[in-house]
Image: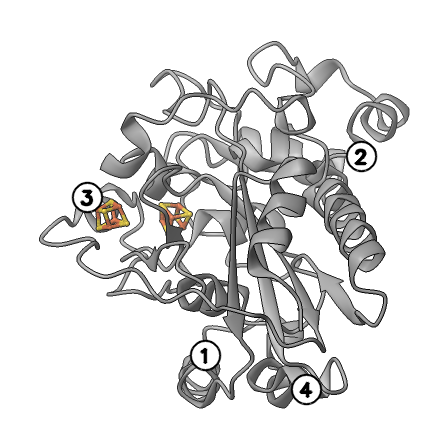
Amino acid sequence: MISSVMIKDAAHAVGFDMCGVARCRHLGDDTLFLKQWLDAGNGRGLDYLGRNIEKRGDASLLVEGAKSVIVCGVSYKNIYSDGYPDSCHQKIASYALTTDYHITIKKMLQQMCATLKQSCPTLSGRVFTDSAPVFEKRYAVDAGLGWIGRQSLLVTPKFGTFVLLGVAIISEECDSYDSPLQGVGCGECRRCVEACPNGAIIERHIDTRRCISRATIEPSYDQSTPLHGWIFGCDECQSCCPYNRKVAATPNPLFAPTFDPLAIDWQKIDEAEFSLRFANTPISRSTLERILSNISPRMDK
Ligand code: SF4
Ligand code: SF4
């Protein structure tokens, strides 16, 4: 048995803004929804989503004896999260301006678990940050961090949507568990649906065939998808969200931009500089050639 208060103290001590604890449970509805979404053709080129679906629905297949899920969130909002100037044709999603969250959040989760292990030596489990088939957003809802917005992202009352998640699935029971939030949600708001330049948001799921985020990053994409000035990712359905309006840029230096996206002259960068400058950022998933191809021919559509 491990203390929920101790977990939250340890999470905040390593820099997480939010932490909740949920019971492991079978996520049958989410598994079914994902299967139907993939069957509808949304997963083309996103083959990893179709792998290990059973593990997504059952955490005990990832961690033997899994009992609890610690869900941690951290704000990554920065000065570009509220939007770029209209004339900008080299927009980059906010998360991609920082050090790759797979690196930062994994380290934070490991530090948190090391602290917890000092008080609870029997603790065992694994940490994940978008690195394995885990329904992280569903557990975040279970753990009371927020709700799933119309654009299918987690919306949190205090930190909005520019939040990165990491989870630790542990084999220890917790002395108390959090509950989903009550009385908050999107209400009548449809701003993200209206703000999506390609009409890709269809009631809490994304038609990835029209999504700019996918079209700028994933290897398989429809080259006719208009990119509206985005060259890596897209924040349009977040910048418009009223829950982000009052959120200040994160003071956490781990999630601060590592470069100024407006100051880069992409035409003057060569492969060596690209590799050097963006090595530890999500942009390293792309190539200079792909970035350049995203900039000009489709920029005016
Ligand atoms: S990321 Fe951009 S294109 Fe994709 S759903 Fe959101 S607003 Fe639409
Ligand atoms: S913009 Fe409105 S509808 Fe979309 S996630 Fe935010 S609150 Fe919900």
Residue type (three-letter) at the residue carrying disc 2:
Asn
Residue type (three-letter) at the residue carrying disc 4:
Ser
Q: Tell me if label 3 and label 4 are in contact, CB under 8 Å.
A: no
Say which residue label 1 marks: 41
287 with respect to 142 (left or right): right
Across and down, in percent, residue 46 comes to 60, 69
Q: Tell me if label 3 and label 1 are in contact, CB under 8 Å.
A: no
Q: CA distance from mark 2 to mark 1?
A: 32 Å
Q: Secondary structure at mark 3?
A: helix
Residue 60 has which mark? Answer: 4
Q: Earlier in the sequence, mark 2 or mark 1?
A: 1
Q: Residue at x 72, y 39 (%)?
A: 100
Q: Residue at x 29, y 45 (%)?
A: 196
Q: Earlier in the sequence, mark 4 or mark 2?
A: 4
The answer to whether the residue bearing label 3 lies less than 8 angstroms from the nearest atom of ligand 2 is yes
Q: CA distance from mark 4 to mark 2?
A: 32 Å
Q: Residue at x 52, y 24 (%)?
A: 250
Residue 280 has which mark? Answer: 2
Q: Secondary structure at mark 4?
A: helix
Q: Quadrant of the C terminus?
A: top left
Q: Which numbered disc, 3 or 4, marks the residue closer to the eye? A: 4
Instruction: Work out whether residue 203 or residue 41 is closer to the camera in this orientation and state it.
Output: 203
Say which residue label 3 marks: 191
